[in-house]
Every structure is written in C-alpha cells, then in structure tokens.
Image (spheres, grey):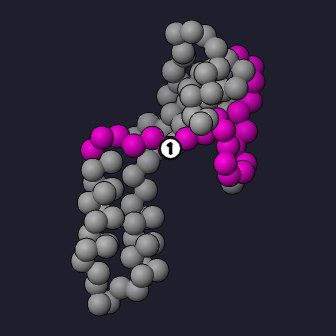
Amino acid sequence: MIMKIGCECGAVIVDQTDYLANKGYIFGDKDWFNFWDIVDDAIENPSDKETREEAAMRVRKSQPTRLIWECRQCGRLYLDDQNHDLVQYVPANKKCNDILDR
Ligand SMILES: [Zn+2]
C-alpha cells in the first residue's frame, strides 16, 4: 500500500517501501507494557493448541504501535492518532531533525 502525505510545506511524504529513514513506530507507555505482557505470555505459557507460528502471529497481530513520519523538507511530524487520523507537530527549530533515523 502506498501512503502519501501532502505536507503543509508543499513536500509530499511517500511511504511505499520498508526501511524508510523518515518513518517510525510509536509505543504509548501503556501499549509498551501490554505488548511485553503478550510477548512474555507467548514465551512462558505456550499453548498445546497453538503452533510457534500461531504464537508469533498472535504477537504480531497485537499491533501496539502507531505510525509516525517526518517531512524531510521541514521536519513536521505526522502521527496516527487513536482513530488513525493524522495529527501534525511542528518542530520548534523549524527544520528536519532526522529524528527517526539512527
Ligand atoms: Zn514539510
């Protein structure tokens, strides 16, 4: 799926491949701990009825993260909110900080 975000600055953020330097995944603190509970449960309490692949899929399907993109031109951040609507944040230094690239 190709995702395009038209930034306020006029640039277009294109999301059509993996390993993007300006895309990330955000964990809220509650989601972080819930995610590790699911991982711990899959490891520590393997079900007789569930294969390893099914347990791995259960962890993957928990999808605790939300997406974030940074505009490479102006540094604005776009985050998915709880309803998958984009919320925009403007950096105080008004530049791209490559905040998601390390
Ligand atoms: Zn921009």
Q: Residue at x 51, y 21 (%)?
A: 89
Q: Which quarter of the rendered picture does the C terminus lie within? A: top right
Give percent across and percent down for residue 14.
73, 39
Q: Is residue 72 visible?
A: yes
Give percent across and percent down for residue 97.
61, 21
* Secondary element at image label 1: strand
Against 87, residue 93 (above or below) is above
Q: Residue at x 26, y 60 (%)?
A: 37
Which residue is farthest front? 102
Residue 69: quarter of image: top right
Q: Residue at x 24, y 77 (%)?
A: 45
Instruction: Residue type at mark 1: give it.
Output: Tyr
Ligand 1 is found in the corner quadrant, namely top right
Q: Magenta segment: does it hold 11? A: yes
Against 81, residue 41 (above or below) is below
Side of 71 where 92 appears, left or right: left
Q: Which residue is mark 1?
A: 25
Q: Residue at x 26, y 69 (%)?
A: 41
Give percent across and percent down for residue 15.
69, 43
Side of 38 where 69 appears, left or right: right
Side of 41 where 14 appears, left or right: right
Q: Nearer the viewer, residue 34 or 97?
A: 97
Give percent across and percent down for residue 20.
67, 43
Q: Which quarter of the rendered picture does the N terminus lie within? A: bottom right
Residue 62: quarter of image: bottom left
Side of 91 where 54 appears, left or right: left
Mark 1 CB within 8 Å of ligand 1: no
Over which residues does the magenta segment extend? 8-31
